[in-house]
Image: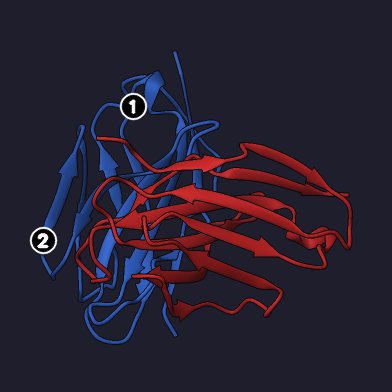
Amino acid sequence: GNSVTQMEGPVTLSEEAFLTINCTYTATGYPSLFWYVQYPGEGLQLLLKATKADDKGSNKGFEATYRKETTSFHLEKGSVQVSDSAVYFCALRRFSGNTPLVFGKGTRLSVIA
Amino acid sequence: ETGVTQSPTHLIKTRGQQVTLRCSSQSGHNTVSWYQQALGQGPQFIFQYYREEENGRGNFPPRFSGLQFPNYSSELNVNALELDDSALYLCASSLEAADNSPLHFGNGTRLTVT
């Protein structure tokens, strides 16, 4: 079946540090890949997405590249801020029909000043 | 543009009771999905409604049921509540029930079952 595995947290970084959150997936066919962010007390917000191999999604300084050969979609940011503290979820959605999002377990990021 | 709104924000119920959670979809969206997010876990798909019909369901028992209304708002009903039903319930709407239609999530309803 379809599944997403992401690195366990929590991840604690100092402000301006480099961030990588690893995400790998298992899926039939060619899924679309997503990163969602959940700030305390809020729902999920779409951070970025990629719909085919070698696509790079980017938003707010975050980037992730769809790597079909390694079935990965790692999230990166060059310089994190305190305001980036949140839980990050990697997710996939199979490219056919009315299919739901399949999420990883989430990675909590804490950025300290 | 009004986003996805859910009510109530918090709810406490006793084991064995029934609960109804509500969701208003974003303006113009005709598809609503419900997800359950247990503490420390990623959201798990419960079901999806498209034009008032259920058109997809995850691995949840029949005591989880739903409705979608003509205005595309939706309800999630859970009967015979169990302690493990304690979770954040997220509603998401999208423009169409298609893979590339992005989901817009509400802030969720936090259900506690005691």
Name the residue located 31 percent from the left edge and 36 percent from the top edge. B2
Q: Secondary structure at mark 1?
A: loop
Residue A50 lies in quadrant: bottom left
Neighbour tally class for label 1: few under 14, some 14-19, many 20 plus, Cα within 10 Å? some
x, y percent for residue B104: 33, 49
Q: In terms of depth relative to the viewer, which is nearer, B41 or A72?
A: B41
Whole-percent x, y for residue B14 in the image? 88, 52
Q: Are marks 1 and 2 in contact (CB under 8 Å)?
A: no
Task: State whether residue A70 is above or below residue A20.
Answer: below
For the residue marked with disc 1, what is the amino acid?
A: Ala
Q: How many marks?
A: 2
Check the rendered structure and report the hue given to chain A. blue
Residue B87 makes an appearance in the image = yes
Q: Amino acid at mark 2?
A: Asp
- In the image, residue A77 sits, relative to residue B26, either above or below, namely above
Mark 1 to mark 2: distance in Å?
A: 25 Å
Of labels 1 and 2, earlier in sequence is 1
Instruction: Using the image, determine if residue A6 lies above or below residue B88.
Output: below
Can marks 1 and 2 be said to lie on one chain? yes
Mark 2, residue position: A55
Identity of the residue furthest to the front in this view: B70
Q: Secondary structure at mark 2?
A: loop
Is residue B43 at least partly visible in the picture? no
Question: Toward the viewer: A24 or B89?
Answer: B89
Name which residue lies at 88% across and 63% down. B16
Q: Which mark is residue A17?
A: 1
Task: Give left or right: position of A109 versus B102.
Answer: right
Q: Chain of mark 1?
A: A
Q: Which chain is red?
A: B
Q: Position of residue A3 (x, y in %)?
A: 44, 74
Q: Position of residue B108 (x, y in %)?
A: 54, 44
Identify which residue, A89 or B85, lies in the foreground. Answer: B85
